[in-house]
Image (cartoon, rainbow, N blue to C red):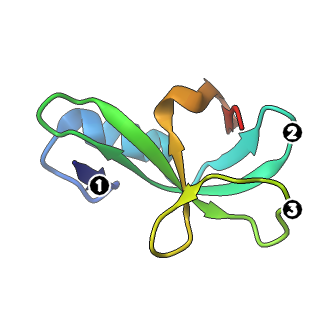
Amino acid sequence: MAFISHYSVRDTMSEILAENLSGKSVMGADGTELGLLYNITMDLKTGQLYDLIVEPDSELPSGVEFNRDDAGRFLIPVSSVQAVKDYVVVQH
């Protein structure tokens, strides 16, 4: 598993993905603003994406629960992503 960012030069697909998604707002399907996309975990050999790492919004309402990393950021499975436009929309 590896982290990607717009600084990655190991994989062209990673660069494109990170450039397009870096810093995007993440929203729940119900319209709750969850925070900003911080990073994405993926397997660099297969290209399989695992989790969106999201810096939670400071004014997040109670009741929003996701697994968290050691820094308190949400780990949202890529399988939860419903749409990517102005926001990344996820089911929660």
Would residue 5 appear left or right of 85 to someone viewing this image? left
Q: Residue at x 16, y 51 (%)?
A: 9
Mark-to-mark CA distance, 3 and 2: 14 Å
Residue picked out by circle 3: 62
Q: Residue at x 70, y 32 (%)?
A: 91
Q: Residue at x 17, y 40 (%)?
A: 44
In front of the other: 84 or 63:
63
**Classed neighbour count for the residue bearing mark 1: other residues with Cα under 10 Å, few (<14), some (14–19), many (≥20):** some
Farthest residue, direction top: 82
Residue picked out by circle 2: 31
Q: Are marks 2 and 1 in contact (CB under 8 Å)?
A: no
Secondary structure type for disc 1:
strand
> For the residue marked with disc 1, what is the amino acid?
Phe
- Which is nearer the N-term, disc 1 or disc 3? 1
Q: Which mark is residue 28?
A: none
> For the residue marked with disc 2, what is the amino acid?
Gly
- Which is nearer the N-term, disc 3 or disc 2? 2
Question: Which quadrant holds the C terminus?
Answer: top right
| Image location of residue 20, percent across then percent down | 47, 40
Residue picked out by circle 1: 3
| Image location of residue 81, percent across then percent down | 59, 29
Secondary structure type for disc 3:
loop
